[in-house]
Amino acid sequence: MKKLILSVLAAFAFAGAHAAGGGIAWDRFPAQKANDLAALQNGAKLFVNYCLNCHSAAFMRYNRLRDIGLSEEQIKSNLMFTTDRVGDLMKISMDPRDAKEWFGGVPPDLTVIARSRSAVGMGSGADYLYTYLRTYYRDDTKATGWNNLAFPSVGMPHVLWELQGDRRPVFEKRVEHGHEVEVYTGRWEQVTPGTMTPLEYDNAVADLVAFLHWMGEPMRADRIRIGVFVLIFLSIFTVIAWRLNAAFWKDVK
């Protein structure tokens, strides 16, 4: 329980750092991906290949991925390293002291990162992550060589850059409050192509975010389904109770 609390606090700190740094309005995450098993499976593959090197998901076990339609054999063959067992937690071997030295801070655990945004009243965590992973651009003034419109001065480099390619946001100069400022226009220029087209990359990011969203609450779909049945039952029982009450008291004057 103590480790889970620390993980949530780390995610909140990650959210607070972004809030202090400003950023652009968030794009809408395609919500239909959240219940798409194919999208969740592709998102799991992207997470293991691109995120699990530095970020852990220490409160999720590999065998829980059976809930998104994967067999244990598929999990072992495609999503695990040779030293891992299917019942292990999704942890990393990076030493926190090394991480702090290399990145300036320990990369947060991602088990509940999508939920942390909503928990602190900042809107949808899925919307933020979907925007964040699509708004990286080159910035030679930063130590990593990258910056991000959704999280200015971010410490994490663009790990998906080979898929997306190198893009440049288009700014225009405006005068606000008597000062000339550069404002993002909502457009991008492709400097060098990636291995994916822009549409393919957006779909891949949506799959990854869908997996992060699912991982924060794997029972969400079951909870919603059970909740609907409970409400239907209570509605029917209310009608029955009302009619029984009328029958019991009909002869009482």
Image (cartoon, grey):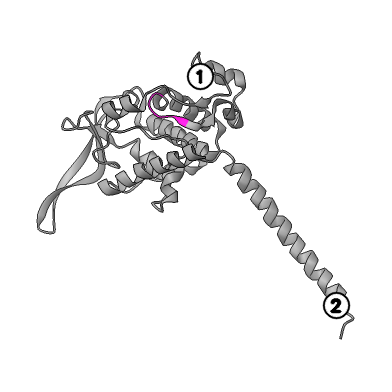
| Label 2, label 1: how far apart the Cα atoms are | 66 Å
Q: Residues within 10 Å of mark 1 (few under 14, many from 20)?
A: some
Instruction: Say whether residue 51 is magenta.
Output: no
- The answer to which quarter of the image holds residue 66 is top right
Q: Is residue 54 part of the magenta span, yes or no? A: yes
Residue nearest the viewer, comparing 60 with 48? 60
Assign a secondary structure to mark 2.
loop
Asked whether residue 164 is in view, the answer is no
Amino acid type, mark 1: Met
Residue at image mark 1: 80
Residue occupied by mark 2: 249
Q: Could you say whether the residue bearing mark 1 is in a helix, strand or loop?
A: loop
Question: How far from the left and from the top, in percent, is residue 140?
Answer: 17, 30
Residue lying at 55% horizontally and 35% vertically, measured from the top left: 36
Disc 2 or 1, which lies upstream in sequence? 1
Residue found farthest to the bottom: 253
- Rendering quarter of residue 65: top right
Q: Residues within 10 Å of mark 2 (few under 14, many from 20)?
A: few
